[in-house]
Amino acid sequence: MNLLQDAYQYFLQNQSFFWQATREHLILSFSALGISLLIALPIGIWIAKHEKSAQVVINVFNAFRVIPSLAILFLALPYLGLGFVPSLAALTVLAFPPVLINTYAGIRGVDAFVIEAASGMGMTESQVLAQIEIPLAIPAIVTGIRIASVEVISSATLASFIGGGGLGDFITRGFALFNVPIMLVGAVPVALLALSSELFWSLLLKRYPSAGN
């Protein structure tokens, strides 16, 4: 209990720094997630339509999941330097696999009879994709986004190691000073943000009509 009280006191004494770090953390996380969606969603749809290329692309992106997040950050250093940009690049790469794989699985999981029926009604391939396949694949796609968002928000704390800012600054500072309350000022908000993201996407998924199918 004393640790939480000390953490709260440190927060009160450093509110401007805390809110700046929170803003940096959110900008970094949402930017990485947004870029990954712009890239991974189209690729996921494309490989669902080109099965021969699917396994190669999925294996390449799965390889990134084996590499620790911190290692990806440091691998970006020689090419992008320190700060926001390499942190953004590393987190974007981290968000790729769940979005891409779930998009692929969602599109591939659409019942072939539904597609045939739509084509039989005179719908073009692009119309079938836009009006049938993507809507039916949304539960799987949202699940991928949910996983990616939690991973990105949690891993964004590591950006502080290369000058990327964010709430990880409190964790690294507390670790350097052997001060647990300072670490809690960064760790607790990150945990709450990750849980909030998980809850948001889970509720959105439950509200979607096809989520239970």
Image (cartoon, helix red, strand yellow):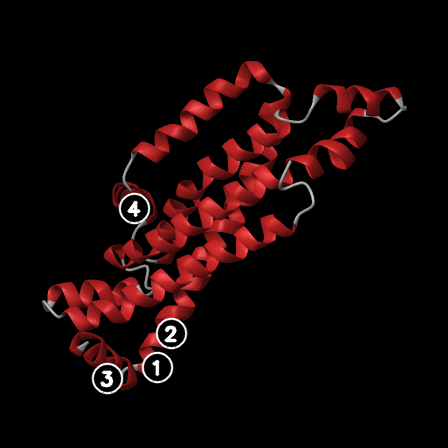
**What whole-number distance in Å separates the C-alpha atoms at marks 3 and 4?**
32 Å
Mark whose residue sits in front, 3 or 4: 3
Mark whose residue sits in front, 1 or 4: 1
N-terminal of the pair, mark 2 or mark 4, is: 2
Callout 3 crowding tier (Cα within 10 Å): few <14, some 14–19, many ≥20: some
Amino acid tagged 1: Ser
Amino acid tagged 3: Gln
Quarter of the image for the C terminus: give it. top right
Mark whose residue sits in front, 2 or 3: 3
Callout 1 crowding tier (Cα within 10 Å): few <14, some 14–19, many ≥20: few
Q: In the image, is 1 to the left or to the right of 36? A: left
Q: Mark 1 points at which residue?
A: 16
Name the secondary structure under disc 1: helix
Mark 1–mark 4 contact, CB under 8 Å?
no
Which numbered marker is on residue 20?
2
Name the secondary structure under disc 3: helix
N-terminal of the pair, mark 3 or mark 4, is: 3
The x and y percentages for residue 23 are 42, 69
Q: Residue at x 71, y 39 (%)?
A: 135
The x and y percentages for residue 29 are 43, 56
Q: In the image, is 128 to the left or to the right of 95? A: right
Q: Residue at x 12, y 64 (%)?
A: 176
Q: Is residue 32 above or below residue 116?
A: below
Q: Name the residue under label 4.
A: 73
Q: Mark 3 points at which residue?
A: 9
Given residues 184 and 42, the one toward you in this image is 184
